[in-house]
Image (cartoon, grey):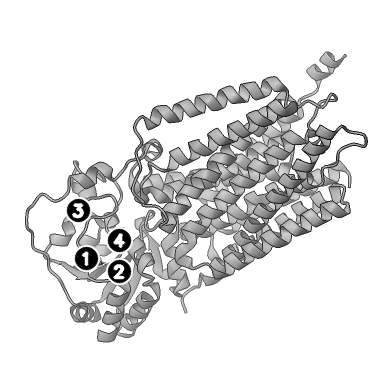
Amino acid sequence: MLAIASDLAVDPFVFRLAIFTLACFVGYFVVWSVTPALHTPLMAVTNAISSVIIVGALIAASAHAFMGSDESVKAAFGMTRAFGFIAITLASVNIFGGFLVTQRMLAMYKKKG
Amino acid sequence: MSANLAAVLYLVSGVLFIQALRGLASPESARRGNLYGMAGMAIAILTTLFAIRLDFMTLVLVLGGLTIGGTVGAVIARRIAMTAMPQLVAAFHSLVGMAAVFVAAAALYAPEAFGINNPDGSLHLQSLIELSLGVFIGAVTFSGSVIAFAKLNGNMSGKPILLPLRHIINLGLLGVAIVLVFMLGGTHGTGQEAQSLFWILTLVALVFGVLLIIPIGGADMPVVVSMLNSYSGWAAAALGFTLENTALLITGALVGSSGAILSYIMCKGMNRSFLSVIMGGFGETAAAAEDDGVERNVKRGAAEDAAFIMKNAGKVIIVPGYGMAVAQAQHALKEMANLLKEEGVEVKYAIHPVAGRMPGHMNVLLAEADVPYDDVFELEDINTEFGTADVAFVIGANDVTNPAAEDDPTSPIYGMPVLNVWNAGTVMFIKRSLGAGYAGIENPLFFRDNTMMLLMDAKKMVEEINKAL
């Protein structure tokens, strides 16, 4: 039964691969249209948005072992929450720092007159 | 919140991130784009917070992390000097890399929390491979960025460090990493063994990252910074596959291609192949070959001479380089341009793609000094104009004006696009000494008749010119 089902249904991985591939092309065209004068803000803002990895950190921080799990599983979940906390902190530095420093830089670009 | 709604919201935040980059096509739209980016991030974070089980302890961890990290980030963003932007970006890259390592670790320790486990608690092989990729690229980004930071910040010499057999060591480390991923796959992600293998893999990646960056010299830093930007994106994308998260996938792809394109532009600006930059060691061999012992005439000038010539010029093109950033001379330079404009002189700025230590470095510094961005031109837009300029005012740049790139096939920088400053009536170089540039190559322009060398700290010299004007 399982074998038949897996033959008929497309693995969700393929959908993710499609999104990823198309996003690479979107990135390619969008970044080529960025004016060279703004390449430094581009790096700062890509820094900030790549910290969306914080979503993984938030899930990690909320990890709960099932009731009645043995000690080693509980310990692993404890570690996971610690990893989550560290990753939230690191990503937050980037999110706040990245967006604010970009804003500060962009505010400086002025036209003549 | 239903899983479908969450997935749609992550997609919305991914689209907002695309808008954030799209805005950077022009300075006017960029400010709005940045707001889109912030909105996208807020949506991604809030969506996740609604989707997870928020008990008291989780709330403490989340708010604690956000507050501590957010405060540190905000303070840094407010205080950092614009000249230190390359270091800051390198430091930020390292944090993304480190965060990726910890998220990957979390996914391995508690796959149930991410819903990527089989019913028996083991991990899908596919997830294991994805998170191995994520942790490897993340750790390389982290340690590579730390080295790049140390080089840019001056904690470490910018000189390339060339280990013997470094290419073989690097290939060996890659081989070890692949074996470790296979072994990790064999454990199905369960037990002490999987965790040990994971951390060994992290360690191998950290060493690899260090070895990757130490042989690359200071002049190639724009490529390194762009490359690490790209890596931080790929690390995020790999984890986007593991966590099955659209926002992370889209962002990873955007950032990855952004860094790759910037690396390409920087390499093209130096006429080097990406591979030769990665192999490292540029500037080592050339430096040894300098000083052929021939005494040549150099025409030195004083601030008064420079002021006199520029005051009577019709058009002055300013060529800033890394030396301007080091001397923090951008404000004095802007004042000089204002004084010249009052005298009726046309003033423009010419920027080489690899001027400074990161892409767009000079543009930010000039913007900081209130130079209007429509006075600032890229190489291809202004290069033909030097012929009509009376003065080319080169401040802290060297290699990017070297005519050897066009007429000396034996020069290491032959073929690199350069600013044709020598077509101007007079070329003025502000430099601290007559030394060679970062590529270790002597600039024959220094010895030409229509060149005037202004040997002093860039900021002091410009201030003295301003006094004389």
Residue B424: mark? 1
Residue sitting at x 44%, y 65%: B83
Tell me the element at label 4. loop
Q: Would you name the residue on which mark 4 appears?
A: B397
Say above or below: B280 vs B192.
Answer: below
Task: Give the Cα distance between marks 1 and 2.
Answer: 9 Å
Residue B317: mark? 2
Q: Which of marks 3 and 1 is nearer the N terminus?
A: 1
Q: Nearer the viewer, residue B406 or B244?
A: B244
Residue B228 in the image, given as x and y percentages of width and height: 51, 45
Residue B442: mark? 3
Q: Earlier in the sequence, mark 4 or mark 1?
A: 4
Q: Which chain carries label 2?
A: B
Q: Earlier in the sequence, mark 3 or mark 2?
A: 2
Residue type beneath disc 3: Glu
Check contact, mark 1 vs mark 2: CB within 8 A: yes
Q: Which chain carries label 4?
A: B
Mark 1, Cα crowd under 10 Å, few <14 / some 14-19 / many 20+, is: many
Q: Are marks 4 and 2 on the same chain?
A: yes
Residue A98 in the image, given as x and y percentages of width and height: 60, 59
